[in-house]
Image (spheres, rainbow, N blue to C red):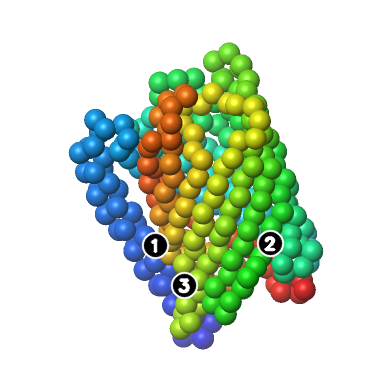
Amino acid sequence: MPKYLTNTFLQLSDYKFFLKFAINLLIILISHDNTAAQSTETDTKSIINQQIWIDLYPHYYISEKLEYYGDAGYRSIVNNKSWSRIYARPSFKHHFNKTFEVHAGIGLFYIFYNNSADQFEVRPWQGFQVNWPKITRISFKHLVKLEERFSFKTEDWSSGFEFRFRYKFFGKVSFVRNEKIFIPFYAELFLPLTGEIEELYSNKGRAGVGLGYKLGNDWQFAFVFNWQGSRVGVGENINVSDYAYQIKIKKIWNGSLLKKNS
């Protein structure tokens, strides 16, 4: 068998193993947390929601400095099926060098509620990112965003507005012996600055850690366990724990251009 076919077969075999591992882990975690949620369902301070997130991340390098990227996907609470969301968030970023970037984009969100009117949101945003420090196998990044949220209830198209600050600390750990496998991690803070949107579910912070796999230079797959604090009613305190099990798929075009960027 030609060498390139052998390498391709090995890569696909590794990918299938990673996908099978992620699916099995997902089933175990959901089964465990469903039991925990049922045992504490009468205690509102201990409510646990399980969510499924499936997200796609396309990246296209237009030039050495300019990159189109973004994300799109589906998210849902699976234990009571009370909330789900579809979204797309096309964005651009300019690489000044390997350390500093500026970002801008717009998010389009449609939120489905079982017991309330659906919501549609438009979220323009701006930000900058610092990629520092970088150790041999560990990279750290800091993303600061200013986000304008325009929200509309679909039953009567009444609107709300919120201007908020977001800070995300994230990075990854690469394995020494196998550079295809990595551990992504992050923590993110949401801070409303002005305005208020009437919404059933709201969170002020989240964090996550996972396991990722690189398939060649263009594809990346990751399974991430996320935790966030949220609420279950308008005006209530943040007293609910959300566990979200996320599958992330990333595709890169013209990635070789980034290596030229110094």
Residue on which the image places disc 1: 19
Q: Do the residues bearing badges 1 and 3 touch, measured as CB atoms within 8 Å?
A: no
User: Which of pointers 1 and 3 indicates the residue nearer the eye?
Assistant: 3
Q: Give the residue displayed 43% in from the left and 31% down from the top.
A: 237
Disc 1 secondary structure class:
helix
Q: Is residue 6 above or below residue 172?
A: below
Q: Is residue 221 visible?
A: no
Tell me residue 230's x, y (percent). Answer: 44, 37
Q: Earlier in the sequence, mark 2 or mark 3?
A: 2
Residue type indicated by callout 3: Ile
Tell me residue 181's x, y (percent). Answer: 46, 72
Residue on which the image places disc 3: 181
The quarter in which the C terminus is drawn is bottom right
Tell me residue 101's x, y (percent). Answer: 74, 59
State the mark number for residue 155.
none
Q: Give the residue displayed 27% in from the left and 54% down from the top.
A: 28
Q: Earlier in the sequence, mark 2 or mark 1?
A: 1
Q: Give the residue displayed 64% in from the left and 27% down from the top.
A: 195
**Quick one: 49 or 28, which is closer to the camera?**
49
**Quick one: 234 or 122, which is closer to the camera?**
234
Q: In this view, does 20 lie above or below 262?
A: above
Tell me how far mark 2 sits from mark 1, CA to CA.
Answer: 32 Å
Residue type indicated by callout 2: Val
Residue 96 is left or right of residue 197, and the answer is right
